[in-house]
Image: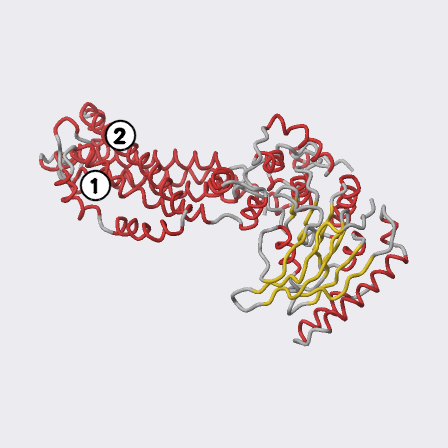
C-alpha cells in the first residue's frame, strides 16, 4: 500500500532503509563534516586564545607576536622567506628522491642475495640510529659543498624507512605466487618486476610517507648545524638569523612555512599512495560492515 | 575421453623426509596414464600435497625418482592450481590470465584472443577488467583455472582447489573441470580430502594413509563419462562412495596413532 508521509516520499521506494542503516548514514555524514570542521574549530579557538593571552598580559611582539602579526609578517617578508623556502624545498625533494633511489636500490640488492643483506643491513641500522647532529661535524669537515652537505644529511635521515619497508615488502610475497612464477620458468628479473616490486608497493609507500617528513626535518636540522651560507640559505638560516635579531614575528612566520611544507608533503604522498593502492589493497578500501 | 594404457608418469619408490624429522612420504609407487583423472585422497598430513609438489618439480624427493616414459614434460606443460586462488591482487583478471604467457614473451595483443577464449570457458567473460578483490571466491578460483590452462598444459595438478568453497559453487566448478578435461585432454592429478569429490571426478582414486604418507590402495571408478548431476544422485555413485569411504577408513585405522585423529577420520568419511 502506498503511504504518502514524508519519509516515504524522500526515499526511493526500492531502497527501503531500516533505522540502523539510516543512523549509520547520518553518523557517516556527521563524521565527514566533523573531520574538517573539528580541527578547524580547535585551530580558531587556539589562535583566539593565543591572541587573548597576548592582549591580556600585554606581551610585546619580540617575546610572543600576536597571530595576526605573524600573518602580516609572512606577507611583508615574503621576499626573504620564499627564496629560503625554495632552498629548503629543493634540498628536501632532492634528498627524498635520492632516498627513494638508494633505499629501493639497496632493498632490491638485499632480496637478490641473503648474503648481501646479512652483510650490509647492520650498517644501515648504525647509520639510522646515530643522531645526525652527532655525525654532522664530520660531514662538515669532509664535504666542502654546502648543498652536498645538506643533501647527505637529509638523505641519511630519510633513506632508512624506505630501505627497511621496501625490504620487508619484497620479502613478503605470497609463497605460492613465488612457486607459481617458478613453475612458469620466470627469470629472476621477471619475478622482481612482475611479482616482488608490485607486492612491495604498499610497504614502500608507507616508508615513503615517513621519509617525506624526515627529509624535511633532515634538511632543516642539517642547515641548523651547518649554519647560514650566503645566498644559498634556507628557512633554518632565516630562523637563526631572526632569533639573533629578535625578529620574532619573522621567526614565527618561517616556522609556519616549514609546518605548511611538511603538511603539503604528507598530503601529496598520501594522495599518491591512495591513487596507487585504491583498487586492490586492503588499506585503501572502504566497505560496508 | 578415456585414458590410454601407456603410463605418462611413474613414481618409483618416492620418499620425502624433512630436516625436522617428519617423514612426509614413504615408498610411494604410482603410475599415471596419459589422460587419467587421478585423485589423491587422504586425511591431512598424508603427504598428498607433497607428492603433487614433487611431480610439479617444486620439491625434490629424498629417495626414489620420477619416470616419464613418453618424455619429461617441460615447465609450462604442467599446470598447477593452488588451494588458494593465488592471484596477483593488483592485476586485472585479464592480466592475471595473461601472466604465464607474458613470462614467455607473448604480448598483450597476441594473447588477447586466447585469454578471451579461456575466460569464456570458465564463464568469466565481461570480468576482464575486474581485480581479484571484486570477485567472489568461486570466481577467483575460475580465474586461477583459466590461468593454469592458458599455456595448454599436458598435465594439470590441482591441490585441493575447491576445498574453501561452498558446496554449490564446488559442484559447478567440478562440472566445469570435467568439461575442460574432456575438451583439452590433459592428464589431471587432483588432491582432495573429499570422498564424494574424488569419486565424482576421477577414473582412478589413490587412497593415501598418513604417518608416514603412503599409497594405501588404488581404486578404479567404473562409471562412464560424461558425469552429470544425475550421476551425483545415482545409486552407482553412492555405492562407489561407500566403497571408497570404507577403504579410507581402513587406511586411517591402519595408522596406530591418536584417538583424536581417529575420531576426526570417522567424522570425515561419514556416508549419508
Q: Kindly identify which numbered label has been placed on residue A221.
A: 1
Q: In which quarter of the view is residue B215 placed?
A: bottom right
Q: Nearer the viewer, residue B213 or A197?
A: B213
Report crowding for label 1: few under 14, some 14 to 19, many 20 or more residues within 10 A (C-alpha): some
Q: How many circles with numbers are drawn on the protein?
A: 2
Query: In the image, is residue B189 above or below residue B44?
Result: above
Percent x, y for residue A164? 37, 48
Whether residue A58 is visible here, answered yes or no, is: no
Q: Nearer the viewer, residue B14 or B170?
A: B14
- Tell whether label 2 touches label 1 (CB within 8 Å): no
The extreme right residue here reads B235
Whether residue A226 is visible here, answered yes or no, is: yes
The extreme left residue here reads A245
Query: In the image, is residue A113 above or below residue A229?
Result: below
Mark 1 and mark 2: span between their CA atoms?
15 Å
Q: In this view, does A200 lie to the left or right of A19?
A: left
Percent x, y for residue A26? 55, 41
Q: Kindly identify which numbered label has been placed on residue A90.
A: 2
Q: What element carries label 1?
A: helix
Percent x, y for residue A237? 16, 34
Amino acid at each position: 500500500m502506498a503511504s504518502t508521509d514524508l519519509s516515504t516520499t524522500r526515499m526511493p521506494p526500492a531502497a527501503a532503509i531500516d533505522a540502523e542503516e539510516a543512523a549509520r548514514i547520518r553518523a557517516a555524514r556527521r563524521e565527514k563534516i566533523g573531520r574538517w570542521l573539528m580541527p578547524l574549530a580547535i585551530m580558531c579557538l587556539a589562535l583566539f586564545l593565543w591572541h587573548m593571552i597576548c592582549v591580556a598580559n600585554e606581551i610585546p611582539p619580540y617575546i610572543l607576536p600576536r597571530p595576526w602579526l605573524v600573518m602580516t609578517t609572512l606577507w611583508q617578508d615574503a621576499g626573504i622567506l620564499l627564496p629560503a623556502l625554495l632552498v629548503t624545498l629543493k634540498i628536501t625533494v632532492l634528498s627524498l628522491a635520492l632516498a627513494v633511489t638508494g633505499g629501493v636500490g639497496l632493498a632490491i640488492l638485499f632480496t637478490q642475495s641473503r648474503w648481501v643483506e646479512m652483510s650490509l643491513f647492520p650498517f644501515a641500522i648504525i647509520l639510522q640510529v646515530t643522531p645526525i647532529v652527532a655525525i654532522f661535524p664530520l660531514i662538515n669537515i669532509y664535504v666542502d659543498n654546502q648543498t652536498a652537505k645538506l643533501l647527505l644529511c637529509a638523505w641519511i635521515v630519510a633513506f632508512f624507512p624506505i630501505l627497511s619497508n621496501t625490504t620487508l615488502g619484497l620479502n613478503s610475497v605470497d609463497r605460492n605466487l613465488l612457486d607459481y612464477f617458478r613453475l612458469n620458468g620466470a627469470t629472476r628479473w621477471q619475478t622482481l618486476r612482475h611479482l616482488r616490486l608490485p607486492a612491495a608497493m604498499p610497504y614502500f609507500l608507507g616508508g615513503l610517507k615517513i621519509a617525506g617528513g624526515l627529509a624535511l626535518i633532515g634538511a632543516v636540522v642539517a642547515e641548523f648545524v651547518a649554519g647560514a651560507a650566503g645566498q644559498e640559505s634556507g628557512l633554518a638560516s632565516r630562523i637563526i638569523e631572526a632569533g639573533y635579531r629578535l625578529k620574532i614575528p619573522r621567526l614565527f612566520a618561517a616556522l609556519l612555512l616549514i609546518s605548511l611544507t611538511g603538511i603539503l608533503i604528507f598530503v601529496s604522498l598520501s594522495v599518491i599512495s591512495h591513487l596507487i593502492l585504491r583498487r586492490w589493497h586492503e588499506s585503501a578500501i572502504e566497505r560496508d560492515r | 575421453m578415456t585414458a590410454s594404457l601407456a603410463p605418462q608418469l611413474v613414481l618409483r619408490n618416492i620418499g620425502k623426509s624433512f630436516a625436522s624429522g617428519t617423514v612426509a612420504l614413504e615408498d610411494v609407487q604410482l603410475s599415471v596414464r596419459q589422460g587419467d583423472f587421478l585423485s589423491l585422497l587422504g586425511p591431512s598430513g598424508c603427504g598428498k600435497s607433497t607428492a603433487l609438489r614433487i611431480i610439479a618439480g617444486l620439491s625434490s624427493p629424498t629417495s626414489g625418482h620420477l619416470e616419464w616414459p613418453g618424455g619429461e614434460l617441460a615447465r609450462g606443460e604442467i599446470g598447477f592450481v593452488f588451494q588458494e586462488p593465488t592471484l596477483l591482487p593488483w592485476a586485472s583478471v585479464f592480466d592475471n590470465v595473461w601472466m604465464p604467457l607474458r613470462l614467455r614473451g607473448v604480448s598483450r595483443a597476441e594473447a588477447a584472443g586466447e585469454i578471451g577464449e579461456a575466460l569464456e570457458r570458465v564463464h568469466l567473460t565481461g570480468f576482464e577488467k575486474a581485480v581479484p578483490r571484486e570477485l567472489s571466491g568461486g570466481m577467483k578460483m575460475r580465474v586461477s583455472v583459466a590461468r593454469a590452462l592458458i599455456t595448454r598444459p599436458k598435465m594439470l595438478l590441482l591441490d585441493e582447489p575447491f576445498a574453501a568453497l561452498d558446496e554449490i559453487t564446488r559442484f559447478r566448478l567440478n562440472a566445469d573441470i570435467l568439461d575442460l578435461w574432456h575438451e583439452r585432454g590433459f592428464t589431471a592429478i587432483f588432491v582432495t580430502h573429499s570422498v564424494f569429490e574424488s569419486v565424482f571426478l576421477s577414473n582412478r582414486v589413490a587412497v593415501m594413509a598418513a604417518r608416514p604418507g603412503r599409497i594405501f590402495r588404488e581404486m578404479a571408478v567404473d562409471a562412464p563419462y560424461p558425469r552429470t548431476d544425475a550421476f551425483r544422485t545415482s545409486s552407482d555413485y553412492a555405492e562407489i562412495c561407500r566403497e571408497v569411504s570404507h577403504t579410507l577408513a581402513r587406511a586411517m585405522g591402519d595408522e596406530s596413532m591418536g584417538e583424536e585423529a581417529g575420531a576426526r577420520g570417522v567424522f570425515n568419511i561419514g556416508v549419508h
